[in-house]
Amino acid sequence: MLALLSTFVFAAAATFAIAAVFVTMKGRRSQIAALLADYRSLQQDREFLVYVTGVQRPAPRAAVDQQVRRTTRRALKRAEAARSARSLRAAA
């Protein structure tokens, strides 16, 4: 008899808890909808950022750009050679 009574008590408590959850969710429906909308918006923002910052083919360089790069590289090589020559003289 005691087991049957405790079973009914637990079942009633579980039913009450489930009913309380549903009543609370019904009262907070607008807030829950706003949270879900924020979540969807953030997800779309993340997808857009991944698309924007994703790896894409680089644009082809114009011939003028390549010429400028070669000239710059030559100047850097000359400067590095001069530095290494000075350091070798200083070490000797």
Image (cartoon, grey):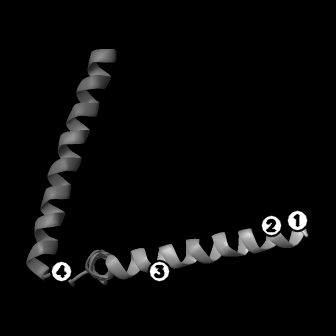
- First along the sequence among labels 3 and 4: 3
- Horizontal arrangement in the rendering, residue 66 relative to residue 16 (left or right): left
Cα separation between marks 3 and 2:
24 Å
Q: Is residue 42 above or below residue 72?
A: below
Q: Quadrant of the C terminus?
A: top left
The answer to whether the residues at label 3 and label 1 have Cβ atoms under 8 Å apart is no
**Residue marked by disc 4:** 61
Cα separation between marks 4 and 2:
80 Å
Residue 31 at what x, y percent from top left?
A: 28, 75
**Residue marked by disc 2:** 6
- Horizontal arrangement in the rendering, residue 16 relative to residue 52 (left or right): right
Residue type at mark 3? Answer: Phe
The picture quadrant where one finds residue 82 is top left
Element on which disc 1 rests: helix
- First along the sequence among labels 3 and 1: 1
Cα separation between marks 1 and 2:
6 Å
Any mark on residue 25, and which? none
Residue 61 at what x, y percent from top left?
A: 18, 80
Q: Nearer the viewer, mark 3 or mark 4?
A: 3
Q: Nearer the viewer, mark 1 or mark 4?
A: 1
CA neighbours of label 2 inside 10 A, class few (<14), some (14 to 19), many (20+)? few
Cα separation between marks 3 and 1:
30 Å
